[in-house]
Amino acid sequence: MLSCVDCGACCATFRVSFYWAESDPFAGGSVPAELTTKISPNLVSMAGTNQPNPRCVALTGEIGKQVSCSIYEQRSSTCREFEAGSADCLKARLKHGITDDVIPIRVA
């Protein structure tokens, strides 16, 4: 079983984009709008993730040691749907040198 609490690699590897209404309090969104960046008319991303070396602004702690999400209860659907142990998870872990408990995969 992979531990997300000890990892955080996904939050520092991928752009976390989602539908803008998830950050609009008037539309029932929960993600704090001030922590997002507009990507297109329909999409926003978590600040810090739309750059060459991404790191989500809500990620606290040291990747691979101990991390947490400062807005965990308010996180986007993208974060809620990300699966520990998925191919993307394993790619992110390998990118950050987190190899314990990881089944070797071929990274393209």
Image (tube, rainbow, N blue to C red):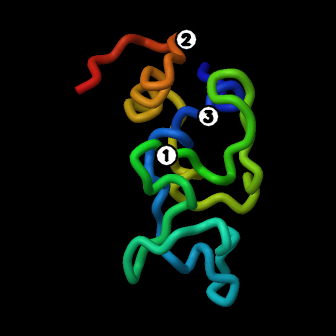
In this rendering, the label closer to the viewer, 3 or 2: 3
| Residue bearing the label numbered 2 | 101
Residue 54 locus on image (x, y percent): 49, 46
Tell me which numbered mark, 2 or 1, is placed earlier along the sequence: 1
Tell me which numbered mark, 1 or 3, is placed earlier along the sequence: 3
Distance of mark 2 from mark 1, alpha carbons?
A: 24 Å
Q: Are marks 3 and 2 in contact (CB under 8 Å)?
A: no
Residue 4 locus on image (x, y percent): 65, 31
Crowd around label 3: few <14 · some 14–19 · many ≥20 (10 Å): many
Task: Look at 45% across and 42% down and name the residue there.
Answer: 53
| Residue bearing the label numbered 3 | 8
Q: Amino acid at mark 1?
A: Pro
Distance of mark 1 from mark 3, alpha carbons?
A: 12 Å
In this rendering, the label closer to the viewer, 1 or 3: 1
Crowd around label 2: few <14 · some 14–19 · many ≥20 (10 Å): few
Q: Which mark is residue 84?
A: none
Residue furthest out toward the left: 108
Crowd around label 1: few <14 · some 14–19 · many ≥20 (10 Å): some
Task: Give the image quarter of residue 92.
Answer: top left
| Residue bearing the label numbered 1 | 54
Q: Amino acid at mark 2?
A: Asp
Quarter that holds the N terminus: top right
SS at badge 1 = loop
Task: Look at 63% across and 82% down and name the residue there.
Answer: 24
101 or 99, which lies in front? 99
In this rendering, the label closer to the viewer, 2 or 1: 1
Residue 13 locus on image (x, y percent): 46, 39
Q: Is residue 83 above or below residue 95?
A: below
Q: Amino acid at mark 3?
A: Gly
